[in-house]
Amino acid sequence: MRKSATGGLRNLKSNNLFGPIGIVDYGCGNLHSVLSAFEFLGAKADFVTAPEDFEQFESFILPGVGSFKYAMNQLYKRQLAEPLVTSVQSQNKKLLGICLGFQLLAKSSSEAGHSDGLCLIDARVERFNHEKRKELKVPHVGFNEVHCNSKDIFFEGVENNADFYFCHSYRMTKLRNETDFIAMSYYGDEFISAYRCKNIFGAQFHPEKSQTNGLRVLLNFLRA
């Protein structure tokens, strides 16, 4: 039986107490599911499609599905990478990267050779290596336990070892500053399943597909 966030769905409402959330649309994200999750929570959210849109929002979501290299190319092609980094680093606005969007915050990925990321997290993204566990399929798809730091605001109200939904072939392996990550998961080997350092948040899992636990995490991001 999956462990659910405490309080159930009835308490997961933001009552519009938070500033508008910008969901970065670069052609690679699970946009409408993310938007629906925030609308369920009662939060205001809209899509960021142009560089000038960033001024309208107080926090951002960087979703993602697909290839790291292609996603980075799209961010630069649509002139969204630089204003996103500026918003986070210079204006101290909050950012949550989801799945591929989380991986894009790293320095680089080995997918399709080598690709530079947004360099907001000092880490590298690598493919799952299951040479000793060939029965484990890649991509990693389905619900999996997340061993979290429940004292961190990102997981407030979520039980340790709660289940979240994953769908990925690559994962973030090591951080230069090992005190920054707040959750680990295991699929053949350990990988970072959630991250927070100051105003930068990341989730390798999909909160918008993780039922009550995922909604709690999104609400915690809004409250942080």
Image (cartoon, rainbow, N blue to C red):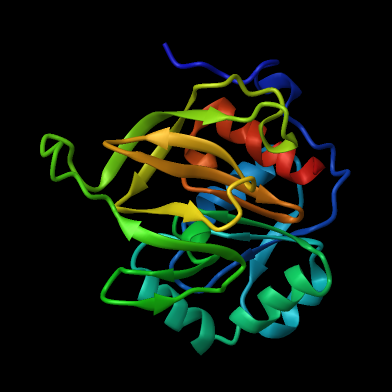
Between 48 and 152, the residue placed more toward the observer is 152
Residue furthest top in the image? 1
Task: Mark yes or no: residue 191 visible.
Answer: yes
Q: Considering depth in this image, is 127 or 51 the residue closer to the camera?
A: 127
**Which quadrant does the N terminus fall into?**
top left
Q: Identify which residue is drawn at 26% across, 36% down.
A: 188
Q: Is residue 208 above or below residue 85?
A: above
Residue occupying the point 71% across, 20% down = 10
Q: Is residue 62 left or right of residue 163?
A: right
Residue 76 image position (x, y, % from top left): 52, 85
In percent of width and height, residue 53 lies at 73, 77
Q: Is residue 87 left or right of residue 63?
A: right
Whether 143 is drawn above or below 85: the answer is: above
Residue drawn at x 57%, y 72% is 119
The quarter holding residue 15 reads top right
Q: Which quadrant is the C terminus positioned in?
A: top right
Depicted 97 relative to depicted 135: above or below = below
Q: Position of residue 182 (x, y in %)?
A: 61, 39
Above or below residue 164? Residue 116 is below
Provide residue 26's location: percent of width, then percent of height: 51, 74
Give left or right: position of 126 versus 2.
Answer: left
